[in-house]
Structure formats: C-alpha cells, structure tokens
Image (spheres, rainbow, N blue to C red):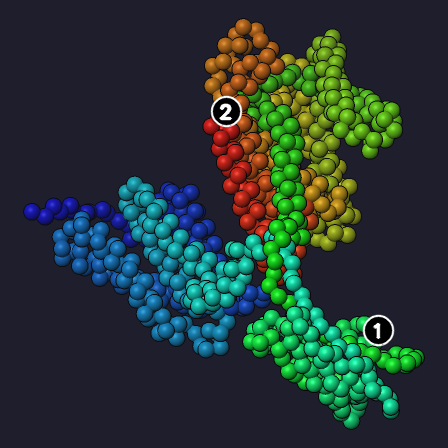
Amino acid sequence: MTETTEIQRSSSPLHAILSLIIPGAGQVFAGQIVRGISILAATLILGFLSIWTSAQRARFPDMGVSARIFVIVLLQCLALLALLLIVRYLILRSMQDDASADAASRGILGVGYIAIILIASRPIMDLAGHTPGMLEIYETTLLLAAASLAGLWLWQSNDAALLGAGNPAGSWTPAILVGTLLILSLGWSITGIDISKAISEFSDTQVILRRIVWPWRTAFEYDIDTVESQARIQAPCPPGAIGPEVNEPLVGEAWISVTPTCGDMTVSDNTGTTLGTELTITGGGFEPGQVVEVLWKNPIGNPFTPRGVGETEITISPDGTFVSSLNIPLALVADTAEGAQLHTLVIRQESNEVFTGRLSDQMNLALVGILESIMIGLMATFFGIILAFPVSFLAARNLMMPIMSKTGGVVGGFVGLVPGIWAAIIGTQYVISLFGGLEQAPIIIAIIMVILFLGLGGLGWRLGAWIISQLIEALPVSIGRGVIGFSFAALAATPGYLLGLGFSRGILSIPLSVEVAAVNEQTYAIIGAVILGVAGAAFGYFSGNEGEVSIGALVYAVTRTILNIVRSIEPIIWALVAVIWVGLGPFAGTIALTLHTIAALGKLYSESIESIDPGPIEALQATGANRLQTIVYAVVPQILPPFISFTIYRWDINVRMSTIIGAVGGGGIGFILIQWIRLFQYDAVGLGVWLIAVTVALLDFVSSNIRARYV
C-alpha cells in the first residue's frame, strides 16, 4: 500500500502578484518586513552583479546593452519556469498529491529547467538581441545568472503567497541554493575558469614542474673535467710569412694540427663578406662520441665563438679523432699593433661532471633565507606574546565590564594623567641622555620608558582621581555638578574636534574637492567639539559625583576596535609599510608580523579569558582579594593551556607568513624566491620550496609534541 500525504496549503494571489512585481513586497504587506526587505536587497544586488559581470568589456562595460539583454532573458526564463511549474502542478494533481512524487518532481523540475535553458540557449539569446549587442556580453554567464534569478524571483513570489494566507514562514534553503548557483555562475566568469585549457595545456608546465619537484642537482657543486688543445695562426699573413710551426700529433693526450698556419682574416664591408683563408683542422686524443667546442682568441687573448665561417661544434669519431675546416674569422686587431699578429684556435671538450659534495651558492642562499624566515617568525611571536598578553586582559569583556568609576574620579584621572605622562616624557629624555642616545641601549631604554609611562601615568591617574573627588565632595552639590559637567565637556570636546576635522578632511572631501573641504574644516571641527562637548556636559551635570562611568567598557571597546583594524590588514601590507619605515630586510618582516601577531593573539587570548570558569574568580573575590590577586590566582591558571596552544600555532603561522612577506622586501626565503622566479631559475626555486616544506613539517611535528606535553 502506497502511503500518501495530502498537501493542502492555502495561498494569497494578491501577495504573490505584489512580490512578482516588486520582490519582497508581498512579504512586507504580510507583515514580514525584515524578510521582505532582505529579499528585495538580495534580488537587487544579485541582479546588478549579474548585469555587471555579464558585460564583456571589463574596464568600461556597456551596462545599458547588458541590462537590456539581461531583462529580456530574465523574462523568458520566468515564462519558461512558470510553464514548467504549471505542468508539474497538473501532473501532481492527477496523482492525488503523492508526497514522494512531490519530492521527486522538485528535483526533476530543477534538472529539467537547467537542461532546457542550456539546450535552448541559442534561441533564447537570439530573441534577446542582435549580433552587435551580443558582442558586448558574456552570453553563458548572462543566461545562467538570469535563469538562477528567475528561480529566486518565483520562489519569493510563492513565499509571499503562503505568508499572505497566514502560513508560517518557510525555509530559506531554496533561496540559498538558487542564490549560490547564481553566485557560482558569476564567479566562474569573473575568475575566467577554463577547464579545457587547463587540461590541454597542462603539459606546458612539465618543464618547470620537473625542475621544481626535483632540484637537488642544483643544491651541490660539480667539477667539470675540461680538455683543451690549441694551435697558433698568424693573420694577416704578410708576403714572405710562413706562420707558426704546425703541431705534431701526440700520444696519450689531446692534440690538434692546423694547416696552413698563416692566412688572411674574413673581411666584411658594404659590398659583402669575403671569407678568410680556409684552415684544415685535424685532431685526436679526445673522448669518443663527445662534442668539442671551437673557440677563437684574438692576439690579445679575447675568446669568442667564430660563427658563420665553419663548424663550431664537432662530434668526435669512435677512435677519438676528427677532421674539420674553418675560415679565419674576422677578429679585432688594434691599428697600432706591431709585429706578427698571432691568433689562437682552441678546441675544448668538457667531460662528465664530478660530484664534489660542496653546497652550491643557491643552496647556501636558500639555507640562509630559511633560517631568516624561522628567526623572523620566532622574533615576531616573541614580541607578539609580550605585547598581546597584557592587551588581551584589556580586551576581555568579563574582566573589563565590571570596572566602574565615579564621574569625579574619571575627571580627576584624566587631569592627573596629563602631568603623569609629562613626567614620564621628561624621565625618558633624561634616561636617554644618561646612556648617550637611544641607539646606545635601545632595549634597556625601551623597558625603562614603558615602566615610566605605566607607573607615572597610573600614579597620576590615581592621585588626580582622589584629589578631584575630595574637592568635588567638599563643594556644594550644584557647584560640584557644574564642575563635573564642565570637565566632561572639556574631555568630550577634544575627540569631538578631531572627529569634525576628520569628517571634513575625509568624508566631506569625497563629494567635494580637497581644497573646498579644507576651507571649512575648522568650522566642522568646532561643530564636532560643540556637539560632543554639550553631550559630555549634560552627562556630567546630571550624573553628579555619585554617578558612575564604565571605564572598563570604554577601554574594552577601544582595545577591541584597534585589534580588529590591525588584524584585518594583511601582513604583506604591513611589510610594505615596514619596508618604507626601516628599509629592506628581515627587520621589516619582523615588524610586520609582530603587528599582526599582537592583534591575532590579543583576540585569541581575550576570547580564552572570556570563556574561563567564573567560579574561582568569585571565590577569591569573596575572600577580599584585589583585582591583581584575582587575575594571578584565578585567571592565569585557567588560561595557560590555551595560551600555549595559541602561541605555538601562531609561531607556525608566522614562519609560513615570513616566506610570503619576503616577496615585498621583508627578508627571509621569500625575498630570495621572488628574485629566482624573476630570473627563471626554477631549479633554485625548487630548493626554496623544498626547504619551506621541510621546515613547516618539522615545526608541525615539534609544535604537536609541545601541545601534547603542556596543553
């Protein structure tokens, strides 16, 4: 017995028509405002991307032609899909709403729809436009995008009909699938995927791949046994000259004999080329079956290959001898030369290479580069840990949110912070003068500077907060409120001034020219200062000295924002900045990776802190422990395992990243690799790739063992 399920859901034609005219309108009319707006936004965005991507000319696409053809194809696809839906409805109705048939028909409908679109693509495109217009678009991309958008359009119309009849909101799955298909079709076109070309032209990569996959001959030096034999020839040959003696054959070693040994050189002028005296060359004692090279040296010893006057490469016969001929080439002879001008004919044979076991220059460079990459990653991780660890506590919501301060304390803190920072600057300058300059002891001075700024700044904040709080409490309530309001107005006016200035120089300069925006920048800066100043004054006055400000929330928001911005910028961009800052080399790469590491580890560390068990914290706070004791004894023990895991993983990432940032001058193996690639030295490139792979594998092995031991 076949199990059947009756599928009866009411629908509203009015809502369907509304969404058919304007996508999402029916959903909005049915009370699903967010759903309707989302559908409208998605339809508009996907439609615009389809039209833009379908335009043939990438830089200056003809959007009008593309849009017109796209709309026509879209209407054809809507009509075709509607027809198929009607056929499906009639078939299912005759089958008494069988649930299994309904599910199967959905798949058949989708496959059949795409198949018909592809089969009938030519007639569809012929109805959409003329040949010149078609030259302006990518037909396949436009066709698939229009077919996908038609499916989305009819889905949302049906969705509106069901919502309008009071049915619950349906699943987004069909829309997601259709939208994914549309985006994939656009992505296929944008990325220029050509599978047939990739398959047919893969053989072209074999030369490079073989050299990269197995580059080990390049890793070592080889000695080449070279055998040379020479003969002397006089040219030009003045009357009465007989030239040098003819070489006699030798036993047990290579020899050549040239006749005659005196003749005239080849002459080339506007009328043509006159070949020089023809020489007969015989030789023996060479390695049978090998090729020898013919060289010519002028009277001052400069060698060259005499092309165009005879054989320059000769194959030795099985008995080790050869016979060849050569016309005396054109060779430079100084006009001031005196006496007989003796040239040298050289026959050179290079025998088999001999393995020496010495590393080649390329291998030495690659080893130095990979060592630099490892050290760049290590130093970036080290500095990143030192700076990310304290920053992570400032970016932890559960630790920062409870930190509150009275309004008077906040005012006093900022007031006291100014002299504290000023004292730290004076102290740092004094320390620098004691050491004789920053370059004499940069690390020690940097440590002292951090201590001075944190210590004196924190001391100034605390003293200022206590003094101002006491003064405000001693004043009448109304006057105290006024003082707090004025102080908050002054504090808020500074960032307001900067925001107004930034608005004028940044946002306002987009529609207007920079010069026009600069004319009124002070006006906007003052407006920004006034707006935030008034808001700060109102907040301070109505809060009074008893009001509280979430200092922790402010610090948390600022820290998180900075970490997100720094982390969102890729290390290769930071490397470009660092190269301009400190020049080419591994130091620039270390700075780039350190900045990104601080942001990345700061986020990971802070999320680990936010996920700790609050029980130990509450227990210590119940005993009267202060904030520092709570962090040391309740927070740190819980976060050490994930901190170690994240740190080791980041070191692995930094080593791999250091091979990339070298491409822009950040040092390491990447800097050497990019040079080899530009010089087409693919064997050397293979050495670098192999060293990177081995290094990453070793680091993964080491880090896995460390995590297994400590995490």
From the top left corner, tell me how far across and down residue 620 is, in percent.
53, 10
x, y percent for residue 374: 62, 39
**What residue is disc 1 on?**
300
- Dot 2 crowding, Cα within 10 Å, few <14, some 14–19, many 20+: few
User: Is 152 rendered above or below residue 397?
Assistant: below
Question: Marks 1 and 2: which is nearer the front?
Answer: 1
Q: Name which residue lies at 30% across and 62% down.
A: 113
Q: Nearer the viewer, residue 333 or 553?
A: 333
Residue 637 image position (x, y, % from top left): 53, 18
Which residue extends farthest left? 1
Q: Residue furthest front?
A: 251
Q: Is residue 220 left or right of residue 509?
A: left
Residue lying at the far top of the rendered structure? 623
Nearer the observer, 364 or 691? 364
Vertical position of residue 620 compared to residue 375: above or below:
above
The kind of residue on which mark 1 rests is: Ile
Q: Is residue 207 left or right of residue 346?
A: left
Amino acid at dot 2: Tyr
Q: On the image, which quarter does residue 479 sit in? A: top right
Residue at 34%, 67% in the rendered image: 118
The number of discs equals: 2
State the residue position of label 2: 710
> Image quadrant of residue 513?
bottom right
Residue 579, can we see it? yes
Q: In what element is the residue under mark 1? A: loop
